[in-house]
Image (cartoon, helix red, strand yellow):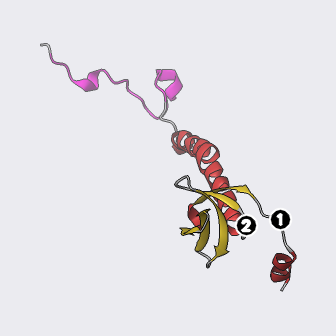
Protein backbone atom coordinates (compact mmCIF):
# COMPACT_ATOMS: atom_id res chain seq x y z
CA UNK A 1 0.00 0.00 0.00
CA UNK A 2 1.08 3.53 -0.69
CA UNK A 3 -0.53 5.20 2.34
CA UNK A 4 1.15 4.95 5.71
CA UNK A 5 0.02 6.17 9.07
CA UNK A 6 1.69 9.39 10.16
CA UNK A 7 2.15 7.90 13.61
CA UNK A 8 4.60 5.41 12.27
CA UNK A 9 7.10 8.23 11.49
CA UNK A 10 7.02 9.84 14.96
CA UNK A 11 9.68 8.68 17.43
CA UNK A 12 8.43 7.10 20.61
CA UNK A 13 9.33 9.15 23.70
CA UNK A 14 8.87 7.60 27.10
CA UNK A 15 9.27 9.26 30.45
CA UNK A 16 12.41 7.30 31.40
CA UNK A 17 14.28 8.18 28.15
CA UNK A 18 15.47 11.81 27.89
CA UNK A 19 14.52 13.84 24.79
CA UNK A 20 18.18 14.42 23.88
CA UNK A 21 18.77 10.67 23.61
CA UNK A 22 15.94 10.21 21.10
CA UNK A 23 17.08 13.08 18.85
CA UNK A 24 13.97 15.21 19.36
CA UNK A 25 14.07 18.74 20.68
CA UNK A 26 11.72 20.12 23.28
CA UNK A 27 9.49 23.08 22.42
CA UNK A 28 10.86 26.41 23.65
CA UNK A 29 9.31 27.67 26.84
CA UNK A 30 7.13 30.72 27.26
CA UNK A 31 10.19 32.97 27.67
CA UNK A 32 11.68 31.67 24.44
CA UNK A 33 8.48 32.48 22.58
CA UNK A 34 8.03 35.96 24.10
CA UNK A 35 11.66 37.07 23.77
CA UNK A 36 11.38 38.08 20.06
CA UNK A 37 8.19 40.03 20.74
CA UNK A 38 9.78 41.88 23.63
CA UNK A 39 12.84 42.62 21.50
CA UNK A 40 10.64 44.02 18.69
CA UNK A 41 8.78 46.25 21.17
CA UNK A 42 12.06 47.58 22.62
CA UNK A 43 13.36 48.40 19.13
CA UNK A 44 10.10 50.18 18.22
CA UNK A 45 10.19 52.14 21.47
CA UNK A 46 13.72 53.46 21.00
CA UNK A 47 13.51 54.05 17.23
CA UNK A 48 9.93 55.32 16.84
CA UNK A 49 7.99 56.09 20.00
CA UNK A 50 10.62 57.87 22.11
CA UNK A 51 11.86 60.28 19.39
CA UNK A 52 8.26 61.15 18.51
CA UNK A 53 7.48 61.95 22.16
CA UNK A 54 10.58 64.17 22.38
CA UNK A 55 9.57 66.01 19.21
CA UNK A 56 6.02 66.53 20.52
CA UNK A 57 7.32 67.84 23.85
CA UNK A 58 9.66 70.28 22.07
CA UNK A 59 6.75 71.54 19.91
CA UNK A 60 4.47 72.02 22.95
CA UNK A 61 7.23 73.95 24.73
CA UNK A 62 7.82 76.11 21.64
CA UNK A 63 4.09 76.91 21.33
CA UNK A 64 3.84 77.75 25.03
CA UNK A 65 6.78 80.18 24.74
CA UNK A 66 5.28 82.24 21.89
CA UNK A 67 5.35 86.01 22.47
CA UNK A 68 4.19 89.11 20.71
CA UNK A 69 6.74 90.10 18.05
CA UNK A 70 7.98 86.57 17.30
CA UNK A 71 8.42 85.83 13.61
CA UNK A 72 6.81 82.44 12.89
CA UNK A 73 6.02 79.99 10.10
CA UNK A 74 2.63 78.29 10.14
CA UNK A 75 1.98 74.70 9.15
CA UNK A 76 0.77 75.93 5.76
CA UNK A 77 4.03 77.78 5.12
CA UNK A 78 2.77 81.32 5.83
CA UNK A 79 5.43 83.56 7.36
CA UNK A 80 4.32 86.33 9.69
CA UNK A 81 4.80 88.14 12.96
CA UNK A 82 2.69 87.54 16.04
CA UNK A 83 0.81 90.74 16.87
CA UNK A 84 -1.52 89.52 19.60
CA UNK A 85 -1.98 86.48 21.80
CA UNK A 86 -5.76 86.04 21.74
CA UNK A 87 -6.08 83.14 24.20
CA UNK A 88 -4.52 79.76 24.95
CA UNK A 89 -5.54 78.40 21.55
CA UNK A 90 -5.28 81.31 19.10
CA UNK A 91 -2.83 84.01 18.09
CA UNK A 92 -3.09 86.87 15.62
CA UNK A 93 -0.36 86.86 12.96
CA UNK A 94 0.41 89.78 10.66
CA UNK A 95 1.36 88.36 7.24
CA UNK A 96 1.54 91.69 5.37
CA UNK A 97 1.14 95.37 6.23
CA UNK A 98 -2.32 95.69 7.74
CA UNK A 99 -3.26 92.05 7.05
CA UNK A 100 -3.78 89.95 10.16
CA UNK A 101 -5.04 86.40 10.42
CA UNK A 102 -6.05 84.28 13.38
CA UNK A 103 -4.01 81.11 13.68
CA UNK A 104 -4.38 78.15 16.02
CA UNK A 105 -1.26 78.00 18.20
CA UNK A 106 -0.61 74.32 17.52
CA UNK A 107 -0.45 74.99 13.77
CA UNK A 108 2.67 77.11 14.18
CA UNK A 109 5.47 74.95 12.86
CA UNK A 110 8.56 77.04 13.60
CA UNK A 111 9.73 80.22 15.26
CA UNK A 112 12.16 81.98 12.92
CA UNK A 113 13.24 84.75 15.30
CA UNK A 114 12.32 85.55 18.86
CA UNK A 115 11.42 89.05 19.93
CA UNK A 116 13.61 90.61 22.61
CA UNK A 117 12.23 90.34 26.12
CA UNK A 118 10.76 93.66 27.17
CA UNK A 119 10.33 94.98 30.70
CA UNK A 120 6.57 94.67 30.32
CA UNK A 121 6.88 90.93 29.53
CA UNK A 122 9.02 90.31 32.61
CA UNK A 123 6.55 92.24 34.84
CA UNK A 124 3.63 90.18 33.55
CA UNK A 125 5.43 86.87 34.20
CA UNK A 126 6.58 87.81 37.70
CA UNK A 127 3.12 88.89 38.85
Residue at the spot 64% in from the left edge and 51% down from the top edge:
50
Residue closest to the eye, 68 or 13: 68
Residue at the spot 61% in from the left edge and 45% down from the top edge:
42
Q: Are marks 1 and 2 in contact (CB under 8 Å)?
A: yes
Badge 1 marks a residue whose secondary structure is loop
Whether residue 66 sits left or right of residue 76 in the image: it is: right
Task: Name the residue carrying label 1.
Answer: 116
- Which numbered disc covers residue 106? none
Q: Which contiguous range is marked in magenta?
A: 3-25
Whether residue 64 sits left or right of residue 20 in the image: it is: right
**Image height check: is 83 above or below 6?**
below
Separation of disc 1 and disc 2 at Cα? 8 Å
Residue closest to the eye, 85 or 56: 85
Q: Quadrant of the C terminus?
A: bottom right
Is the magenta region chiefly helix, strand or loop? loop
Residue 116 rendering spot, x and y as whole percentages: 83, 65
Residue with the most extreme bottom position: 127
Residue closest to the eye, 65 or 47: 65
Residue 37 rendering spot, x and y as whole percentages: 53, 43
Is 66 contained in the magenta span?
Answer: no
Whether residue 71 sits left or right of residue 2 in the image: it is: right
Q: Quadrant of the N terminus?
A: top left
Quarter of the figure with residue 89: bottom right
Residue with the most extreme left position: 1
Task: Name the residue carrying label 2.
Answer: 69
Q: Between disc 1 and disc 2, whose residue precedes? A: 2
Quarter of the figure with residue 58: bottom right
Amino acid sequence: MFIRNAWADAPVVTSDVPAAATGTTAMPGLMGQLAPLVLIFVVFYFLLIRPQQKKLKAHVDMVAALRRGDKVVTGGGIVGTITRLIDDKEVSVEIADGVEIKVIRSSIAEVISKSPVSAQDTKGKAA
